[in-house]
Structures are given as structure tokens and as C-alpha cells.
Image (cartoon, helix red, strand yellow):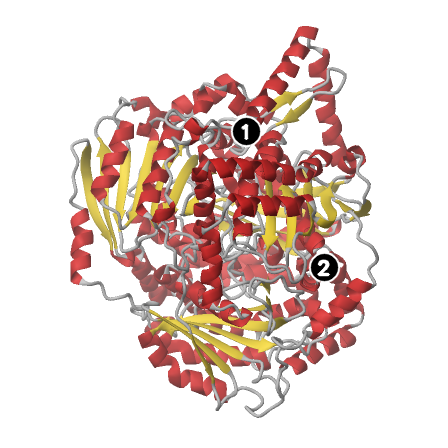
Amino acid sequence: MTTSVSSNTGYPRSSTRPIRSKMCALFLSVSAQTSRSYALSFAYAPLKSATATRTFSSEQRALFALKKQCAADACPSGGSPRLGRILGNFGRSNSGAFGLGRLASTSGMSIARPATLAPLELELKSQMDVTHDAFELVRKDVVEEYGAYCSLYRHVRTGAEVLSVSADDDNKVFGITFRTPPNDSTGVPHVLEHSVLCGSRKYPTKEPFVELIKGSLNTFLNAFTYPDRTCYPVASQNTKDFYNLINVYLDAVLHPRCVSDPMVLAQEGWHLELEDKDEPLTYKGVVYNEMKGVYSSSDSLLTRESMRSLFPDTTYGVDSGGDPAIIPTLSFEAFRSFHEKFYHPGNSRIFFYGDDHVEDRLRIIDEYLSEFEASPTSKLGSTINWQKKIFDKPRKEIHPYPAGADQPEHMINVNWLLNDAPFTAFDELALNLLDHLLVGTSSSTLYKALMESGLGDAITGGGLSDELLQGTFSIGLKGIQPENVEAVEKLVFDVLKKAAEEGFAEDDIAASMNTVEFTLREFNTGSFPKGLSFMLGAMSKWIYGADPTEALKFEQPLAELKASIAASGSKVFQELIQKLLIENNHRVTIEMVPSKTMEDEQVKEEQSRLKKIKDSLSEEEVEGIMETTKELKRLQAAEDSPESVATIPSLELEDLNRKTKEYPIEVDDDDVSGVKIIRHELSSTSGIAYVDFGVDLSSVPLSDAPLLSLLTRLMIESGTTDLTDVELSRKIGTHTGGINANIAKISVEPEGAEEFAVVDGMHMMTKMFIRGKSTADNCGELFDLMTLILTDTDLDVQKKVIEILKEKRSGIESNIQGAGHSYANMRIQSRYGVSGHIEEALSGISSLDITKELLAQAEDSWPAFLSRLEGIRANILSSSLRSGALLNLTGDKKVMSIIKPQVDTFLGGLPGSSDGEKVQNFYKVQHPWAIQAAAEMEGAGPLEDEGFIVPTQVSYVGKGGRLYDIGDKVSGAAMVASRYLRNTYLWDQVRVIGGAYGGFCTFDPKSGLFTFLSYRDPNLATTIDAYDGAGDALAEAAEELADRPEVLAKAIIGMVGDLDGALSADQKGWVSMQRYLGGEAPETRQARRDQILETTAEDFRDFAKRLKGLGDPSVAVVSSKGQFEASGKVMKLTELL
């Protein structure tokens, strides 16, 4: 079963700013071979929202640390951390709260916490009293809000601080964080974050991290660099695995090989490369190429300039990730000194969370710290200095960004430095609520004014950023005509002045308050470990010397804020706007102007710089660079010895659970309503009901399918007959935990299909899902709102439609530049099957032209456009609605009992009747979209390699084809082989040797399709050549695996780890529903797991043979014109931007 979801995929969550990490590349693949759900696969995530969106954040609150996690492709050092994995994209639209009703009536929450059994509570509490001779117990605390029992220790010998959190959660988390403020933009903290994981004293392999990835059950394994700190977190549900990960990470950060081996800096950071003395010098290096990709993004450049301008005197003014023009000035001496200065235990903050024993935590930490002495200067030397508000008047700067021939638009950000002294907890919470009131939803005051002005295409900045020592507020637009730039800045101030003078409506404050409060209480982190979110929340205070547990408590400031609002309404927000924004002169407006020559100028400047370097070298120095290049490549290509690999701790096959994870499901074809009801009764959902209502879309013509994502946006954002968009948003925010709408295309098993056989994709379900959540008591309000937006959305909103389409166009353009690998992948997949063909039209490169056409029609022929929208809704609400509808409910037993009357009322009030027209059975018949797509593909002509030209300094290289023919049976062992190839050959050839930020592959056992992909790649032709050698490399590996069963076991363990990721309650219900609709039985999943566990070297040989005979392979590449010209590869070229 494969599932594609467009629009937003899930319950609304806070959107995020980007994070960079060493291991991002390992997790970029759009892999159909794993059921681990991180809400959105990174490769497709950029397609889900046209621009960065906001709900709210709180540096004081653990949950709001989630908003900081995003893809690695956006902004450099933009006041946010950098992280590889992507979290769920909680859409901007109405991510409201669970129903409290009016604020005046809220003295407490109705979200229930599971009753804690006395023995468990006593056990957790007892863990707070554990002592160890090497540690001083500084203080104990209980974070009642989250049932967390905390002890803060200080290591006597080194001064290292350890926060031990005991909780009833088997998804255990460890993290060690160092304060690492840089004083330049060489990217030394970022390069070091990559490099320490490349071998250590105890684990002398080239990359122990990759060995862990190959054979671990981890639920999180990464490292990430903030502008002022570097974090190394791991998580696992298996205790043995958890402590294996901790051992490797502690040795890596404290005793890395990189500080004694310059070749690591050369590989991960930068080096001069020369293989032929008559060829020009080039720069290579993973971080160097990663940051070239970052600096190709206009959004990234805007954020970088914003931070630099606001912080002229502190570490936040430089780029901890590295400026590609400056990275090559980083010397090995400076690199080594940075580690020596900042990576001492005395400068660390060490964190544990979960249900393991505190004695074990303290023991393992002391084993690593006991050999160090105290370093009083280490922590002092890493102090983060405050940027004082020194501007006597606001400033403005203008900077260029690389643009294509048809990109005349400007961008603007208005940026404020908010504080130069610590905020109180009250102020922080009030600021987050103000942020939500201003930009939290599409109907928020400032967001709405900017988007409805018509002055630009999409929001920039996104509002409050508060995860660092000092907060900032940034807002603006992109896609602005030059003559409108000043009008945007004026509009921002006009809206803020009006808000300061008039305040906010009581209903708006109530909705925002409910949103913030219920999000805090639900603490839904999806499949992202709760403990990691807890750690990031604590670290936002702890890293600056404050109390880590106080950063996680919200009851007192929340009560104070409610009291303030009850006493004086919105006065607190009006005063904040006046003081921190209107009267604050420490403000910089950044305007970005398009430059059609910037890309060429950057290339020429680099070539000129390298030519000068080469011309200045003696013949012996040139020979030296050639020898170093040769030696580096030899080292990169060399295999670790079996003895070195054996030092990496790993699990055994016996440690695995041989049974698949299944989730409760009960299916009821309700005779009264005619609607299929799917229930998932879990042990506890804290009194919250998660509701997904789906309606069939098969009667909507495929030609109108591109309008469906627009329709889902309108359903949430445009209002109804009796409610304006603002009023609808208020209701959603006040009474629910958020409502969203999305489109799901689910491949299904045709009746009579053989188990594990590749299918042709002609059988599928297409559904529009309205997804929401609320407390059980407020489920009636939730269902009423779902009915309203399904049946009564105001579609005659031309201005809103144009606004959304412009935003989508802008987003696609930005995403192709920053996430070109996902577009290359969709393009390749579209050539071999109807499912890929449909997906590419809706979300791929083709969707850019389609969106432009829709925008033109909306502007020039509104009546015809409106008629199309109304026709789609009429199709959905036809007499067959109930036949094709389903209601997916997830909750605990009490929740299910409470909501039953509301469920019956909701189903009874739906349009149509139970004896209405029946939707076709798509397990038996082909879907109309698939039939139309097949006809379109027949007329498409022969396959051809394609290149897509955009302004960029890197390439995204894809190649793929059909690995298994329709009808062929695919064993689960093929998934093991594909994963192994990704983590060995492709990692080594494309990333380590080639210098790309990522090299990986995707394999879908249901379609039989396989693709190679690279991410932020300095190469093009050589990467394709590497792909062509993959089959032979895997065949050689198969022979090794036959002789080394421990290596094969590690590959199997890693695959099982992918299958067994932790899911939140709502995700369990959603995944279980998808499995049911796809037609795959639990027995089939168990049989596939058995195949995985029984994988042999012969399975690898078979997979390698198929790779060497990949059927009708083709190429899709996103890159610059210069890269295509230099590659020598023949492709059909299309200039996109």
C-alpha cells in the first residue's frame, strides 16, 4: 500500500524554521520501504505548504520546541537550530485548541491525564533520590504538567550538569549539548558537528554513526547545530540499543578522531581538490556544498541578512552553519582549537529521559567524565553575550538574491530585536499569545492584512522567534513588485499601530488562549520523541544558566496571564506591541532584490579565487594537493576492517521482536447512516477524540484534481454563508484542537491479487479528509464545524483564491530550488505508472505550470473558475456521499463512550441517504483517475532524460526505473537490500567521496519502482556514473555478507528499526486506517516481517542483478545551466525559473 497525501497531512501543528545537521542526508529519502511515520517524509514535505507558516512558540515550553524542527534546506543561522529530520507539518490554518468555550469560563482544563498508579508514581519519585559518589545532587523537582520527575546533578570532578528525568515512557532519550558560539562564519561549529561522528578513540571506524544507522532500533539519531549550541541526541525504545547509542555518542564528542586527523576536516568541511595538474582547482567538502545549497535560496539569504543586521556585535550576527565564501578560510588549527575550547564536559549539559534506571545513567556518564579535570574557563569562555539595543533609529538594507529570468519580484522583512535583558515567564507566554494573535492563523490580524493586500505572494519572517538568548520578531512578504516595497513596510506598521490602539477582540483572545493552552497540555509530539522535545524546551533556559525545569512549567504564568486578561482585556498585548515593536528603534528592514547575474558572478568569483591560489603555488605545492586528493579518495573508498567495525556495539537478531506492531481497529458498516465507521480504542488518549472524516473523490474529473488542494484551503480559510473567515477561525480555535483538510490517494490491493505482487496502480481510493481533534466533551462542536465546512464553504471568494494560488506558486518555486531531489523523484516516478503520473501533476514540477494556469483563469475568468469549484463540491456532495464516506475515530474507552451520541447526530445530518447511489468498489474496478492517467501516458511519447534549470549552486540528481515488473513478487528482503545500498555504497560514493550533502535511494515494493537521488550535490555526471555502478557494488557486498553473517544481521536489524517507530495516538489511528483501506491484512505484514528477518546474501544477489538490469532507466536533474553545460550529459532542458 502506498499513500499520497496533499495539502496538510494531519492535525494542525506548529510550522517551523530550519535546522542543519550532519545526518539530514540519511533521512531525506522518500522511502516506501518503511512504515516509520515521521508525519511527512522530508523529500515531499516542502510541497505541503507554499511558505513557512506559524502558529506559536515558547522558548519556555517543552512542546513549543517542536516548532524549531524543520527541513535542512532553508535558512542559514536564522536564529533557529538546524536538524535533519522533518517533523509533521502542522499547517498554519486554524491550528486551534480543544474546546474550552469562552475564556471567561475557563479556570481549568478538561483534558484528562491517565490516572497514575500509585506504585508507578512511587517508583518514578524514588528515582529522584538516586545518588552516586561522583555526583552532587543539586536539586529535585517534579514537572507536574507532564508527570516528569527530575533530578539535577553536578559531576564533582568536571562540573558537568546532568538533568535526569524519569517518566512513564519507554521511548528513552539522551542528549549532550555544548555551548558553541562562533566568532566568524567559517561554519566551525557546523563542521565539527559533522566531524566528531567520524570515528573516535573507542570506535575507530570511519563513521560509527553510519554503523549505528545500519543496525539500530533508534527512534531518533542525529546531531544539530544552533547559532550558539550544538546538540547530540539519541532515542530508542530498546534499553540495550539506547545505551549502545549513548556510548558511541559520548566517545564521539569527547574523544573524536577529527581533532588529530586533518582528513576528516577535508572531507566534512572543505578541501582543495585536484586530480590533474592541467585542470583547475576546485573546492570540495560536505558542509561546503550543503551551505552552497542553503545560500542558493532567497528565503535563506533573507533570514541570514536579517539576523546579521540585528546582531552586529554578538555571535548571532555570524553564520554558525558557514558562509560558502568564508568556509575555505577555516584552518585545521582553528578547527581543533574550537573543539578543545568548547567540548569539555564542564561546558556541557547532559540530559536523560524515560523509564530506564537513574543508577545506569550516572554510571555511564561517570565512566566517560572521570578522566577529565575541571576546566573553569570552558564554561566562562562560552558565555553568550547580549546584543544591546543600540540603534538610535531604524535601519534599512538592500541585498541581491540569485533569480531566474522571470523572477522580477522583491522580498522584504521587517525585523526587530525584542529584548536585551531576560523576559519574565509571564512576558514570554504573553508574547507567544501575541504572536498567535498577529500571525498564528490565516485570519490573524497581521497575517490576514498582508496576504489580502495583494502586495505580495507569500509571508516571510513568520513572526516571533524565541529559542535563543534574545527574541526577534520578523514579518514581511515576498513576490513584491518594486514599486510596492514601501507600501508593505507601511502596512506592517499601520496594522501594528491599530492593534496597539484598539487591542484585540475578546473572542480572538479566547481562541488564541485556548490554542496555546491546549497544545501545551496535549503535548502531542507525533513520532518525534517526547523526551527530545522536553530536552529542547529545558535547554532553551538551561544553556544560558537558568533553571532547566522551570523552563517546562506553564501553570503559574498561564494563570497570571488569564488574570491579567480578565482584569484588563487586551491591554497586556497592546503594551507589548507599543514597547517592543512600535517604539523599538532596534529594527532593520531587509529588502532583497533579484539579480539575474548573481549566480554567474558567484561562479566566476570562485573560479578566479581558485585560479589565483593555483597560480601562486609552486610545482611541488601543486603536486602536494594532488597527492592529498588522491590520499583522501583512497581513505574514503577504503573499507573499515572487521576488527574496527566489531568495536561498534550492536544488537543481535535475538533482541528483536518478531511480531509486527498492530493497532486496535474495529470496522462497522453502519446500516443506518450508510457510512463506514472505523474505531481505534487505545488505552489512553487523555480525554481527546481524534476524528477523520473522509469523502470519496472518484467522481471529480482528473482534470479538476489540481483544484482540490485549493478547495481544502478554502474550506478552512474562507468562511461560510453565515460566518466570515475570522469568525470561523475563532470557532475552530475556541472549541477544537484544530481542523484541517487534505487529499489522500491510497493505492489498494486489487481483489485476487497475489500476495507481495507488484500491481499496476490502477486500483486506488481518492478521499478528501477533514481531520480534527477536541476534548470528548466538545466533540459535538467539532462535528458541527466539520459539517459546516464540508457543505457550506463560501467559494465565491476570488481575492482569496488568487492569494492562495500566488502563495502556492511562490512556494513551489522556492521548493524546487531547495528540495529539487523530491521533484526529480516525482518526475521519474511519473514516467512508469499512473500513481506517479497523478502525483507529479498535483505536487511535482508540472504543478508549477498548472498553478500558473489556474491563477490566470482565476484572475481573468472568475465565473468559469468558480463554476469548476462549485462543480467539484457538487460531485462530492452527491447522492453517493454516504456510500463513499468513512469516519475514522481514535480515542480511549471513555472518550468513545462520551462521543457516541455526537457521532450518531453527525452521521444522521450528512447529505444524502444510506440507500443513495453507490460508489464503485475500487478493489474490483479501476479508478477513473487511473484510467485517464493511463490514457495521458500513452500519448506522452518515449522516455527521455530531463534537466530543469533553476538558479542554484548545487545539483539534485535523480535516476530510476522499473526494478520489478507488474506481477512479480517482491520479498521483504528486497527492502533490506535497498536500505543497505543507501547506507553503504551511496553514502560513500555520493556523499563521502562525491561531497554531496546526501546520496540515497527509494524503493516501493508495491510499484516495483526504484530511484537514486542526491541532495545538494556538487556533481552531476559523476553522480549518475556512481548510480550506474550500484548493481556491481551490491553484488560484491552480497559475497561479503555470505561470509560475514554479523553484517547481514545488522542490515536486518536496521530495517526492523525502520518498521517499528513510535507513534502518537492520532498517528496510530491514521496508520491503522490506511492499512485497512489499502487492503493489506495483518498476516501479510507479518509474513513480510518474517521475510525481512530471514534475509540472506542470495536475496542481495538477486536485488543486485535486478539493479544491473534496471528496466528503461531515465534521469531527472534539477541544477543550474552551467552545471548542465559542463556535465556532457544529453538531456532535454527546461528553464523553470
**Residue 847: image tag:** 2
Report x, y in % for residue 698.
66, 76
Report x, y in % for residue 978.
57, 47
Report x, y in % for residue 211.
46, 36
Q: Secondary structure at mark 1?
A: helix
Residue placed at 61% from the left, 29% from the top? 993
Write down the quadrant of residue 309 in the picture.
top right
Q: Is residue 65 visible?
A: yes
**Residue 939: image tag:** none
Write down the quadrant of residue 421 in the picture.
top left
Left or right placement of residue 680 versus residue 147 in this view: right
* Front position in the image: 663 or 442: 663
Q: Residues within 10 Å of mark 1 (few under 14, many from 20)?
A: many
Q: Quadrant of the N terminus?
A: bottom right
In space, the residues marked 1 and 2 are separated at their CA atoms by 36 Å
- Circle 1 or circle 2, nearest the eye: 1
Report x, y in % for residue 695.
58, 77
Left or right placement of residue 259 versus residue 1099 in this view: left
Residue placed at 80% from the left, 45% from the top? 405
What amino acid is at disc 2? Ser
What amino acid is at disc 1? Glu
* Front position in the image: 1028 or 1136: 1028
Q: In this picture, is 643 found above or below 1068?
A: above
**Residue 268: image tag:** 1
Left or right placement of residue 169 versus residue 715 in this view: left
